[in-house]
């Protein structure tokens, strides 16, 4: 049940044919630091992720028959979800890290065999250390059958004076896809057109003395075509940009201190305001921290009442009875690792919710081997409301059971930037986040606490109250 982690890259020594000529010295472009121009810059080494993680080590090659300009391009063949994923890094040599401080973006051309989105694309992943403090990730890069130019900003170039992570990628598709990238380089683009805007996510956090919380960050920019995009850091959409690019300040150090990673520690009863800067530029927004002596262990209010039209909804559970719920075989399978499921009523309300305590993982089933299965093939989103007093993350997966046989599954994870303690959090997940899963034959949903060590099945401490589980158009 563990989340699929990026593993240390393995060398491509076994792939001489695929990468023949990759390391020739390319002609220098007019400006910037080249990563690939007909071949990888000398010394820049492409490495797939460890095949034990599911990485297809032959996914990246050099295509000398297709190029935006010149004679060759990077080709990444994205496999279907049933055969693994395409993932890897391009690293500068240990002895020659690159100074990117005079550039402000990774720029490149891209195309694909059909219109699609490419899972994760960016730079700054170098495994020394890991997690890499300056990792930049663009999720869902849009690709078409025409060559299109894109850019991904460096949040604060002065931080990258010795960077080895020139490029990283990870992608999977329901149906195999070929993609190409060309003229990849770090360059200085017009700052006004880039329109880089950092922000602190306005939020209020309640902490006990000794508890901590992360500052939520956002960084948006304009792509070459004017589309507004956002960048993240680690392997999770919505994680926000790497905090190592920012500096933080607490308005009251006696109440709450904030470190260089954006982690706020409650020190004394009272209130403090946490702000941030990106270089010399103050980021709008603030985190207000209330440090208290007691905190609630259960919701004090009901979850928001759903507002989607009933005709556009397939509901599994909603305490407000706004929708008619479809049949669920069980909300906690016998193979679940959690305390027994309870259904408490929120004090002062008529709202009855699902409570999963000491959660490691818990299965929700729709008679997977015999049916009928859950059919949400006509829906576009999954929604649920969640409240926790002690967890900083949550994950779940959908598992298809076509023909009564377990099929493809896919998982989504939410970290501390999304999951907040002592409040209802509404999760709205596009069903495109579950590539390869047969949405007409869902046999299982698995709730997961991502905190415990899945390799040891360590005792879980996460408690989750869940309401309003439904799919909608």
Image: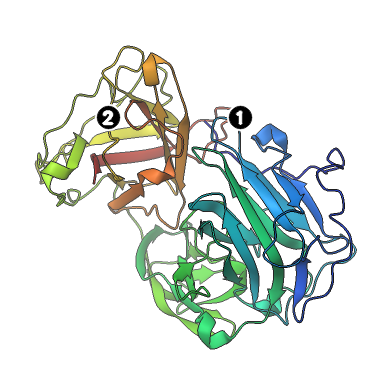
The residue pinned by badge 1 equals: 455
Please say which color scheme the image uses.
Answer: rainbow
- Residue 202 lies left or right of residue 135; in this view the side is left
Q: Is residue 234 visible?
A: no
Q: Position of residue 233 (x, y in %)?
A: 57, 60
Query: Could you give the CA–CA distance between mark 1 and mark 2, rounded to whole angstroms?
Result: 33 Å
Height in image: 365 above or below 435?
Answer: above
Q: Residue at x 18, y 28 (%)?
A: 326
Of residues 411 and 69, the one nearer the viewer is 69
Q: Position of residue 293 (x, y in %)?
A: 35, 58
Of residues 437 and 162, the one nearer the viewer is 437
Q: Residue at x 62, y 73 (%)?
A: 154
* Local crowd size for mark 1, using a 10 Å CA cut-off: few (<14), some (14–19), many (≥20): few
The residue pinned by badge 2 equals: 375
Q: Is residue 288 visible?
A: yes
Q: Position of residue 358 (x, y in %)?
A: 41, 32
């Amino acid at each position: 049940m563990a989340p699929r982690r990026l593993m240390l890259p393995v060398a491509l020594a076994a792939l001489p044919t695929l990468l023949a000529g990759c390391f020739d010295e390319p002609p220098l472009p007019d400006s910037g630091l080249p990563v690939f121009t007909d071949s990888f810059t000398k010394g820049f080494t492409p490495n797939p992720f460890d095949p034990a993680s599911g990485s297809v080590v032959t996914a990246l090659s050099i295509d000398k028959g297709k190029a935006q300009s010149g004679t060759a391009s990077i080709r990444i063949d994205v496999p279907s979800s049933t055969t693994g994923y395409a993932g890897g890094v391009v690293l500068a040599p240990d002895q020659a890290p690159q100074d990117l401080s005079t550039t402000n973006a990774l720029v490149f051309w891209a195309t694909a065999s059909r219109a699609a989105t490419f899972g994760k694309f960016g730079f700054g992943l170098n495994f020394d250390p890991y997690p890499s403090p300056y990792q930049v990730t663009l999720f869902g890069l849009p690709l078409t059958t025409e060559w299109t130019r894109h850019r991904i900003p460096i949040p604060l170039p002065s931080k990258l004076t010795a960077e080895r992570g020139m490029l990283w990628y990870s992608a999977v598709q329901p149906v195999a896809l070929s993609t190409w990238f060309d003229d990849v380089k770090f360059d200085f683009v017009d700052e006004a057109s880039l329109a880089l805007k950092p922000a602190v996510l306005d939020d209020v956090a309640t902490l006990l003395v000794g508890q901590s919380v992360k500052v939520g960050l956002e960084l948006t920019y304009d792509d070459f075509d004017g589309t507004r995009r956002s960048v993240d850091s680690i392997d999770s959409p919505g994680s926000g940009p790497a905090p190592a690019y920012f500096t933080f300040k607490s308005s009251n150090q006696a109440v709450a201190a904030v470190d260089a990673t954006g982690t706020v520690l409650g020190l004394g009863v009272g209130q403090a305001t946490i702000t941030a800067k990106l270089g010399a530029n103050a980021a709008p927004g603030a985190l207000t921290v209330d440090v208290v002596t007691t905190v609630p262990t259960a919701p004090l209010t009901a979850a928001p009442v759903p507002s989607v039209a009933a005709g556009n909804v397939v509901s599994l559970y909603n305490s407000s009875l706004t929708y008619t719920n479809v049949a669920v075989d069980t909300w906690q399978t016998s193979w679940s690792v959690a305390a027994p499921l309870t259904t408490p009523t929120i004090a002062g309300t008529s709202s009855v919710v699902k409570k999963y305590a000491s959660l490691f993982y818990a299965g929700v089933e729709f008679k997977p081997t015999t049916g009928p299965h859950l059919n949400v093939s006509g829906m576009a989103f999954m929604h649920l409301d969640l409240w926790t007093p002690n967890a900083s993350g949550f994950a779940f997966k959908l598992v298809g059971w076509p023909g009564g046989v377990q099929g493809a599954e896919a998982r989504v994870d939410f970290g501390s930037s999304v999951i907040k303690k002592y409040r209802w959090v509404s999760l709205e997940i596009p069903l495109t986040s579950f590539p390869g899963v047969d949405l007409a034959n869902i046999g299982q949903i698995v709730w997961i606490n991502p905190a415990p060590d899945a390799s040891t099945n360590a005792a879980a401490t996460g408690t989750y109250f869940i309401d309003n589980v439904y799919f909608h158009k």
